[in-house]
């Protein structure tokens, strides 16, 4: 195979593997949480603050990382960030108090922001526009697979070797992948972009007027509100409202997320790419349609008991997770290469701020005052809102050509 064909796939494989570690590191804590809570004598609120600290500093760091990546070497920032967060993960061995663990989580959030903000821009410059949906489908397989792997790693190794041991296993590959990525050539920014730069697409000031960007960001925020709330509360819903055991509920929902996540991530990108030659807003359309289809299915999952419930939950999860690759593809296509990392950083900050940060708390509030079943009306409404935003946003999508060669404009 010629090197020009081998290089993009090698780079994609390495970046996807590092993304996988990123999500493993996040979810290991959830698997060993009871052991951490027991050792440090923590309340549920204190344990919850660990994830809140991670997510909060991750959000705050992203807007600072983005502009740096648009000015300096993306590869170097990715490598340094991977070494930084892998080193902190390894240093979990020396966390012997709750506050040391809190600092560790805070700094890991900052380190991981360097990767999540920058890596999509690197991936976008490796492949032509017509393949980006499928490529991001592969890259974002790390979300369901990495999350499940973190649960498995912590659940299997934690009870036998202590809760710190799984973090060591998650840390070591990060150093090796960082070393491998350091030898990758950095792709030319925007080498496959077919749409010319405009003030709206190519400047930070113009980003305020970029309707394609805002349609993706607001649609993603509403979808993340729904997904974040469902991920936190669905196992509890199965226990409290449907009478399943806690272990059984977690295993069932975890299996649903992994299987549906893999299929949905690949399918969403593939369908978006297939429709691209005939529909300029194909990625918006796929996401909007999947959200719209998910609304009645989610209602059935929540309010229809019996054998229909679990298939409905699985189908609703599929429709929610179909959006991952199309929306991220629409995001990178909505902005020019010169400000792409900055735009992704702003997107990350906003969709977390208005999405999965408030949704679990708001659902908890409704559950306390009404019922957990009533609380799930909020993510259903959010799905409908996301669909409406994205259907409307289709009109702002730019018609993409196919760049014949690197450097086409």
Image (tube, rainbow, N blue to C red):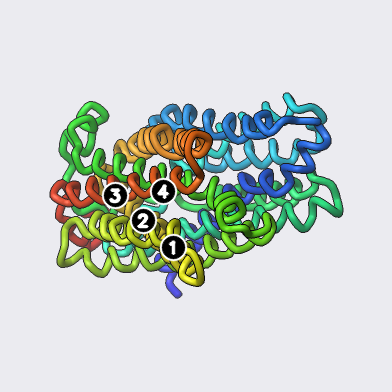
Q: Is residue 177 left or right of residue 87?
A: left
Q: Find disc 4 in the rendering and name its residue.
A: 120
Q: Residues within 10 Å of mark 3 (few under 14, many from 20)?
A: many
Q: Is residue 368 above or below residue 308?
A: above
Q: SS at mark 2?
A: loop
Which residue occupies 52% across, 49% down? 231
Q: Viewer-nearest of labels 2 and 4?
A: 2
Q: Are marks 4 and 1 in contact (CB under 8 Å)?
A: no
Q: Is residue 162 above or below residue 205?
A: below
Real-space Cα separation, disc 3 to disc 4, in angstroms = 27 Å
Q: Find disc 1 in the rendering and name its residue.
A: 304
Q: Viewer-nearest of labels 1 and 2?
A: 1
Q: Is residue 347 left or right of residue 31?
A: left
Real-space Cα separation, disc 1 to disc 2, in angstroms = 25 Å
Q: Viewer-nearest of labels 3 and 4?
A: 3
Q: Nearer the viewer, residue 106 or 184?
A: 106
Q: SS at mark 1?
A: loop
Q: Earlier in the sequence, mark 4 or mark 1?
A: 4
Q: Earlier in the sequence, mark 3 or mark 4?
A: 4
User: Mark on residue 323?
Assistant: 2
User: Mark on residue 384?
Assistant: 3
Q: Are marks 3 and 4 in contact (CB under 8 Å)?
A: no
Q: Are marks 3 and 1 in contact (CB under 8 Å)?
A: no
Q: Position of residue 73 (x, y in %)?
A: 45, 38
Q: SS at mark 3?
A: helix
- Can see residue 43? yes
Could you say which quadrant of the image residue 96 lies in?
top right
Q: Earlier in the sequence, mark 2 or mark 4?
A: 4
Real-space Cα separation, disc 2 to disc 4, in angstroms = 16 Å
Q: Earlier in the sequence, mark 1 or mark 2?
A: 1
């Amino acid at each position: 195979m010629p090197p020009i064909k081998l290089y993009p796939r090698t780079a994609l494989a390495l970046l996807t593997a590092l993304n996988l570690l990123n999500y493993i590191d996040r979810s290991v804590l959830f698997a060993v949480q009871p052991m951490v809570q027991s050792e440090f004598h923590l309340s549920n609120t204190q344990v919850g603050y660990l994830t809140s600290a991670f997510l909060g500093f991750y959000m705050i760091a992203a807007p600072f990382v983005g502009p740096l990546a648009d000015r300096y070497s993306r590869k170097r920032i990715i490598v340094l960030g991977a070494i930084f967060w892998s080193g902190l993960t390894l240093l979990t061995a020396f966390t012997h108090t709750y506050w040391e663990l809190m600092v560790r989580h805070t700094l890991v959030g900052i380190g991981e922001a360097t990767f999540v903000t920058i890596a999509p821009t690197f991936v976008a410059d490796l492949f032509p526009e017509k393949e980006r949906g499928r490529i991001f489908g592969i890259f974002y397989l790390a979300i369901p697979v990495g999350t499940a792997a973190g649960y498995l790693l912590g659940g299997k190794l934690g009870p036998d070797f202590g809760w710190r041991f799984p973090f060591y296993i998650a840390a070591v590959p990060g150093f090796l992948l960082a070393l491998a990525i350091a030898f990758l050539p950095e792709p030319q920014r925007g080498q496959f972009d077919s749409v010319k730069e405009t003030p709206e697409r190519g400047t930070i000031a113009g980003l305020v007027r970029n309707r394609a960007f805002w349609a993706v960001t607001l649609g993603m925020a509403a979808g993340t509100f729904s997904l974040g709330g469902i991920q936190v509360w669905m196992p509890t819903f199965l226990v409290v409202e449907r009478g399943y055991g806690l272990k059984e509920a977690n295993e069932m929902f975890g299996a649903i997320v992994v299987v549906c996540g893999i299929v949905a991530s690949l399918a969403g990108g593939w369908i978006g790419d297939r429709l691209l030659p005939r529909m300029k807003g194909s990625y918006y359309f796929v996401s909007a349609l999947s959200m719209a289809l998910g609304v009645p299915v989610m209602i059935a999952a929540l309010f229809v008991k019996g054998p229909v419930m679990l298939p409905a939950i699985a189908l609703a999860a599929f429709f929610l997770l179909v959006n991952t690759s199309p929306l991220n593809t629409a995001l990178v296509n909505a902005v020019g290469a010169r400000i792409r990392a900055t735009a992704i950083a702003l997107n990350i900050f906003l969709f977390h701020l208005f999405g999965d940060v408030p949704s679990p708390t708001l659902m908890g509030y409704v559950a306390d005052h009404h019922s957990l079943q009533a609380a799930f009306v909020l993510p259903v409404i959010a799905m409908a809102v996301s669909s409406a935003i994205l259907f409307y946003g289709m009109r702002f999508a730019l018609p993409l050509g196919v760049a014949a060669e690197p450097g086409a404009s």
